[in-house]
Amino acid sequence: MQQFRLAICDDEEYFIEDIRQYLKAYISETENEIIADSYTSGKALLEISEREEKSYDIYFLDVDMPEMRGTDLAKELRQRYPMAVICFITSYEEYAYEAFRAEALDYLIKPVKYAELRHTLNRCVIQIQYCRDADAAKKRYLEVKTNRGSTLVDMKDIIYIEKRRNQCVFHLDDGELLSYMTLSEAYDMLDKASFFYVHQGYIVNFAQIREVKMKVVCLGKNREIPISRKYQPKMRQMHMDKIMRLRTEKYQG
């Protein structure tokens, strides 16, 4: 389990409480521990941080706050803590441009949904882990080219990758990601001990396989993808070997 410190700065206390409840859910379903402090103004965050010598890995900042706007607060935080991850929370989509100018990793629109917060937190964790240990992170995360530049994806969250014309779609645990890489380019970057072609248009995360049939591979959440005849014997044998190994380990344990 890894630990991360998070500061929430928002002048609406009921919203802070909503985020705290979401954080409890996030902690319960991931390997990450989030220690969160909350502030109702940017000036309070800066003053307390300086007085108590507190710094955070992640900052969630409301854009529209009295006394000090979230974008101005972000500039101050960026000067003090250049490695921190900053995300904006706002009720207005037009603030998105300001968020990216302030080098924010992401922005969330109120009312925030848990799935959106979870996705943002996962992105924050990936970036922080790169800062903490770049070598280990490179073995775990894949940089995926998208129409907005690139994003880092945890390989264990990839269920399968699908070819779509000259692009490919990463089917993830929490959604889909359209990439401007080709399927072969994606395969070159993957861990060859974990990812396998099952069809000329599909690569699967072996850990996600539940059953190998004659024409399809069954994955979690009732997903099925086609498997070519030439790949079927190898994948079936590998899957059966895994089942036998798990049974043996369970029996010996």
Image (cartoon, rainbow, N blue to C red):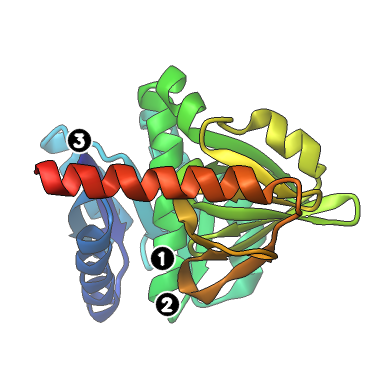
Q: Give x and y (percent) for residue 82.
A: 43, 29
| Residue 50, label in figure | 3
- Looking at numbered disc 1 in the image, what kind of residue is underneath it? Leu
Residue drawn where x is 58% and y is 47% of the image: 235
User: Are the residues flagged by discs 3 and 1 in contact, CB closer than 8 Å?
Assistant: no
Q: Does 98 appear above or below 75? A: below
Residue 250 visible in the snapshot: yes
- Looking at numbered disc 3 in the image, what kind of residue is underneath it? Glu
Residue drawn where x is 58% and y is 30% of the image: 192
Residue drawn where x is 66% and y is 64% of the image: 214
Q: Give x and y (percent) for residue 34.
A: 21, 51
Image quadrant where residue 248 sits: top left
Residue marked by disc 1: 117
**For the view shown, which residue lies furthest in the right direction?**
165
Residue 62 visible in the snapshot: no
Q: Nearer the viewer, mark 3 or mark 1?
A: 1
Q: CA distance from mark 1 to mark 2?
A: 6 Å
The quadrant in which the N terminus is found is top left
**For the view shown, which residue lies furthest in the top direction?**
135
User: Are the residues flagged by discs 2 and 3 in contact, CB closer than 8 Å?
Assistant: no
* Residue 70 placement, left or right of 193: left
Image quadrant where residue 47 sits: top left
Q: CA distance from mark 2 to mark 3?
A: 32 Å
Secondary element at image label 2:
loop
Secondary element at image label 1:
helix
> Mark 3 or mark 1: which comes first in sequence?
3
Residue drawn where x is 61% and y is 54% of the image: 160
* Residue 1 placement, left or right of 92: left
Pick the front one: 198 or 172: 198
Residue marked by disc 2: 113
> Mark 2 or mark 3: which comes first in sequence?
3
Pick the front one: 99 or 11: 99
